[in-house]
Amino acid sequence: MTTLQPVNPKPFLNSLTGKPIVCKLKWGMEYKGILVAVDGYMNLQLANAEEYIDGNNTGNLGEILIRCNNVLYVGGVDGDAES
C-alpha cells in the first residue's frame, strides 16, 4: 500500500505555472489548459482552456479565470497523456 505525502499547495501550484493542468470543480466540471498564473488566494488563470462535463469536451473557452472556492482539485497533465 502506498502512502501519500502532504504537499504544500502554493509551491505546488507555482511549480505548475506554464504547464498543462487539469482542474476539477466541486460542481463536476473539469477544465484543462495551460496554467498562466496563480494569486495569493489560489485563483487560477488558464490559457487554451477546454471544458469537460461528464468526460465529454463541451468546447474550447480560451483564457479563463477560476475562483479559488470552486476548485475541488488541481493536477499536472503529462504531455503524452493530453488528448
Image (cartoon, grey):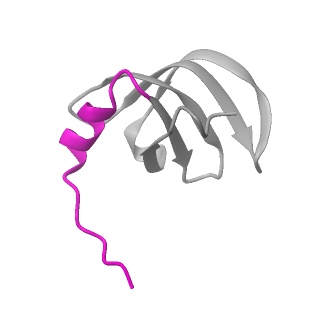
Q: Quadrant of residue 40?
A: top left
Q: Position of residue 28 (x, y in %)?
A: 65, 52
Look at 59% across and 35% down and name the residue there. Answer: 31
Q: Is residue 79 left or right of residue 19?
A: right
Give the image location of residue 43, x and y in percent.
35, 32
Of the 4 image quadrants, the one containing the N terminus is bottom left
In the image, farthest residue toward the bottom: 1
Q: How many marks?
A: 0
Q: Nearer the viewer, residue 40 or 80?
A: 80
Q: 9 above or below 68?
A: below
- Residue drawn at (71%, 20%), measured in percent from left and top? 60
Q: Is residue 59 above or below residue 72?
A: above
- 83, 39: nearer the viewer: 83
Identify which residue, 27 or 4, lies in the foreground: 4
Question: In the figure, residue 49 lies in which quadrant?
Answer: top right
Tell me residue 62's x, y (percent).
61, 14
Image position, residue 20 (x, y; %): 48, 29
Quadrant for the C terminus in the image: top right
Vertical arrangement, residue 39 with respect to residue 75, above or below: above
Q: Residue sitting at 51 percent across and 42 percent down? A: 23
Magenta stretch: give its range.
1-19
Q: Is residue 55 left or right of residue 75?
A: right
Task: Identify which residue is drawn at 43% across, 34% down.
Answer: 67
Q: Is residue 73 magenta?
A: no
Asked whether residue 17 is drawn in magenta, I would say yes
